[in-house]
Amino acid sequence: STLTGYNQWRWASFDDRDHLGDPRQPLRARVLADAAAHGLKPVDGPMFLLTNLRYGGYCFNPVSFYYLFDREWRLAHVMAEVHNTFGGGHNYWLTPEVAGRAYRAMASKAFYVSPFMPVDLDYWFSFTEPGERLNAHIDARRGARVLFDATLSLERRPWTATEIRRQLLRFPASTLKVTAAIHW
């Protein structure tokens, strides 16, 4: 589509520079190298990325999720690549535990994402596998007290020119809206 692109300016585009590591290397290799650096066993199955695209050349991804499966299509790891508005980032490697139809994991907060929330919190994640529907939920907690709660619920849509146009017209500046709301 002329509206979308890969590593080039478009209304909406995916750019390798927006994700971990050296953008000259394939993203899968960068993710697997980061997993190995964190002492995780290599996986040889499919990998999926849930992320936000650049819009009009501007990118802000508060969190991107990488779903890593083994050869038998069992979810082995999830990596939450978190960024703040100041250009900082941290990768949280999660080994999910099955909890009913969802998976759960916890990680201690490692850096400031928001100037309004302290670092001494824990992130509690709950998510489903990518499929026809996908849910990702994060709580930021101090002990039993929830200080932040965010949920993303998505439905799979086809990657067609018609669907892309429809979504871009429906949400023309979603990244700018999120960034403006954060700064407000």
Image: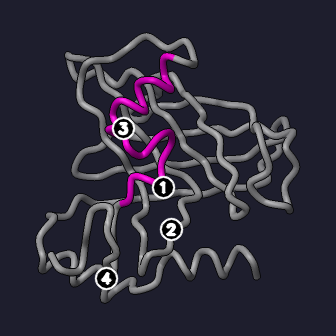
- Is residue 160 part of the magenta span, yes or no? no
Q: Earlier in the sequence, mark 3 or mark 2?
A: 3
Q: Earlier in the sequence, mark 4 or mark 3?
A: 3
The residue to which callout 1 is attached is 18
Q: Do callouts 3 and 2 mark residues in contact (Cβ within 8 Å)?
A: no
Q: Amino acid at mark 4?
A: Leu
Pick whichever of labels 4 and 1 is earlier in the sequence. Answer: 1
Q: Position of residue 107 (x, y in %)?
A: 67, 31
Spatial separation of the CA atoms under disc 1 and disc 3 = 13 Å
Where is mark 2, residue-wise? 59
Number of the label disc, if any, that sits on residue 168: 4
Give the number of the mark in front: 4 or 2.
2
Q: Amino acid at mark 1?
A: Asp
**Considering depth in this image, is 110 or 12 the residue closer to the camera?**
12
Seen at 78% across and 43% down, the residue is 111
Q: Determine which of the numbered discs, if any, sits on residue 175 in the image.
A: none
Given the image, on which type of amino acid does mark 2 rest? Cys
In the visual, does 115 lie left or right of 5? right
Extent of the magenta region: 15-36
| Res. 168 image quadrant | bottom left
The numbered disc on residue 25 is 3
| Quadrant in which residue 158 is drawn | bottom left
Which residue sits at x=79%, y=53%?
Answer: 147
What amino acid is found at the position of numbered circle 3 in the picture? Gln
Of the two numbered discs 4 and 2 on the same chain, state the one appearing first in sequence.
2
Q: Position of residue 169 (x, y in %)?
A: 30, 89
Q: CA distance from mark 3 to mark 2?
A: 20 Å
